[in-house]
Structure formats: structure tokens, C-alpha cells
Amino acid sequence: MPRALSAATRRWYPYAEADLFDIHYVQSADVLTLVHPNYAPRELRRFGATDWMLIEINFTPKIDPPESIFVTSHGNTTNKYNYFYVVTSVDAAGVNESRPSQEAGTSGNLFETGATITIGWNPLDGVARYNVYKKQGGLFGFIGQTAGTSIVDDNIAPDLSKTPPIYDTVFQPNGIVSVPVLAGGSGYNTLTTGGNITSVYTLNQGSGYTNPTMTVSDPTGSGATFEVLTNNGAIAMVVVLTEGLGYTNPTLILQDPTGSGAEFKPIVMPVTNHIFSEQQQTGKKLTPAEIQQKVTRMFAQDLTLKGWLWDTSKQLMSMKAGDIPSSDLDAIKKSLARQGIANPSNDQLIRAYWVGKNVR
């Protein structure tokens, strides 16, 4: 029976007063649907001026599927194929359909002339029709509807655009709302520094290389691997196979039985961040060639360093921490200290300097 809203009935809803302003709603005629993160969805239905009902929405099917599905093949000379079926129930209005039944199957060969398979089940009260689905390629597709308790498959092609309904438990009562912490552990909120090695810039190609291999040494990072390519004895390119993680002061080590003279610079995450920043500003993705050109320009260009008596120019790739103006160096060290880096490496200082200067 609908519950009447009257002066005597002032607290007939389940919501706590503190939660009322977090209720979201949508209205369709005399039905107001209410949702809240902490409550199951409900419908407030109006039947009259003083006749209202608040109903929890039921997301489960209103009718059951048939049980005891039996499948029998007829007119087969060979059992070449396996056939599987499920059946659902449909109510008189044709609106509500049940979950699928347990699948049942048999063997046969419906491509033979006269071969058929009969799918049958026991009747259910309150059910007007039954839908039958046949399995093909891992999915059950519709093959027919009947008001009776059996259907004959004479090699009907399943309609995979219509499959049995799936009822997920969207709002599960008494779910997990919290997890007790049994042991707090340690070391959390520790600042993670460093980055991954995205590429290797070749400063000097050297000569005489026959079988070069490259490794990297770093106090914090690990995991980076490389492939070194040569051209007539000179280092043509270093390919980063895996970028690793956590590098703060990487040193590249090139080993070869005969070659010498090659010099390199690892490009770590700040360069990548700079590339991302430019892509966001320009609104387009840079091609690999454009990225390489930008990295080359970034590290090969001159920076003008202010001095007491005159200005000097310095290439980024050959910069040392001592080349950074003292005022900037002090500011960088203070900034890194606030991030938990008390003793920054030379590379960290240099990278912070050119990132801060927004080198283009």
C-alpha cells in the first residue's frame, strides 16, 4: 500500500539530514528518481495529493528463466558439430526478460538434409513467451521466440545483434566501505626524484669502433638498456631499448675493444616534459624528426651567461654547474632543497637551470 505523507508521518524516508543536499534527482511526470552515493537509488512516486510512495529501485529481473533445458538431435548421421543453447522468459507485456537459463547442448550436423535439434523446457507461471538463443563464436544469438515449451532448430543462423540480457549488480548493499590498516609501514610520502632516460645525444662520434656496448651508472636509477649503432667505425646512433626509472646523475659507459673518442649525454625526463609543454602550446604532436631537431637545438645552442666584466656564451651540452650565475645557482639549490634534494648533482642543477630559463 502507498504510504501517506501526513503531519504524523514526518520521517518516512531513509536519508540522514546531513545527506539531503547530496541527493541528485531527475523527474519524469509523477516519478522523481533519487540517487546518492551512500544509498540505493529510489523512486518517489506520486499517486495523489496525499498519496506518495518511496520505492527502492530493483535492478534484478522480475521473472525467472526456465529450468531443466533439454536438447535432442534428430536425423543426423554424424555428430560433427557441438551445439549449445540458452532460453529466457518474457512477461506478458513483452518488456521484462529474465536472465538466461543454464546452457544445454548436444552433438549433430545441421548441415545434413533433414537434420534438426529440438530445444525444450518446463513451463513457468506468469511467463507469456520464451526466447531461445544459439551459441556461435562464443556468443549466444537469438534464433526464435515461442509461447510453447519447445522450438526446433533446423540450422537457423543466430542473430548476434540480439543476445540474452546481462544483469549486473550495480548497487550492492553491505559492500566494502572501509579497510582497517593493520600495519602502517614506513617510508611513504618520501620524495621520488629522477626520471627515465628517453634518448642519448651523441657529442662526438669517435672512430674505430667494431663491437660497442653501452651501460649506465647512476646512484639511484636502474633498468635502462641501449643498442649502439655504428657507421664506418663511428658511432651513428644510440637507441634506448628500455628507459629505466629513477635516474638522477647518469653516466654512460661505452665499451669497445678497438674504438675511442666518442662522447655522449643522456637525455632524461625534463627534456621530455619540455617537449610535452611545446606540444600543448602548439596544439599538435611533434614528429620524431621534430623532437630530435628540438633536442639538438636545445643542447647545441649558446646560452649567454652574465659576468662581472663581460658576458660569455656557453653551450648547454658542455655546461658545468659552475657556469651557472651564482644568483641563479643559489635559487636553484634552495628550490631543490625544498623538494628534499639537499645535495643535487651537477646534472640536476644544469637541468633545473635550463628548464627555468625555458630554453627554446
Image (spheres, rainbow, N blue to C red):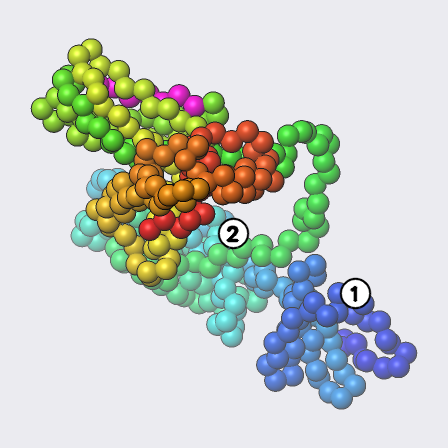
Q: Secondary structure at mark 1?
A: helix
Question: Can residue 143 be seen by looking at this rendering?
Answer: no
Disc 2 to disc 1, how far (Cα)?
Answer: 47 Å
Q: Nearer the viewer, residue 98 or 148?
A: 98
Q: Main secondary structure of the magenta part?
A: strand
Q: Nearer the viewer, residue 338 or 153?
A: 338
Q: Residue at x 46, y 34 (%)?
A: 348
Q: Is residue 102 left or right of residue 284?
A: right
Q: Is residue 334 left or right of residue 40?
A: left
Looking at the image, is mark 2 or mark 1 earlier in the sequence? 1
Q: Which mark is residue 18?
A: 1
Q: Residue at x 79, y 86 (%)?
A: 50
Name the amino acid type tagged 2: Glu
| Magenta-highlighted residues | 211-218
On the image, numbered disc 2 is attached to which residue? Answer: 67
Position in image of residue 76 (x %, y %): 24, 45
Name the amino acid type tagged 1: Ala
The residue positioned farthest toward the front in the image shown? 309
- Estimate how packed mark 1 is, as few (under 14), some (14 to 19) or many (20 or more) residues with alpha carbons within 10 Å: few
Q: Secondary structure at mark 2?
A: loop
Q: Residue at x 49, y 39 (%)?
A: 326
State which quarter of the image contains the N terminus: bottom right
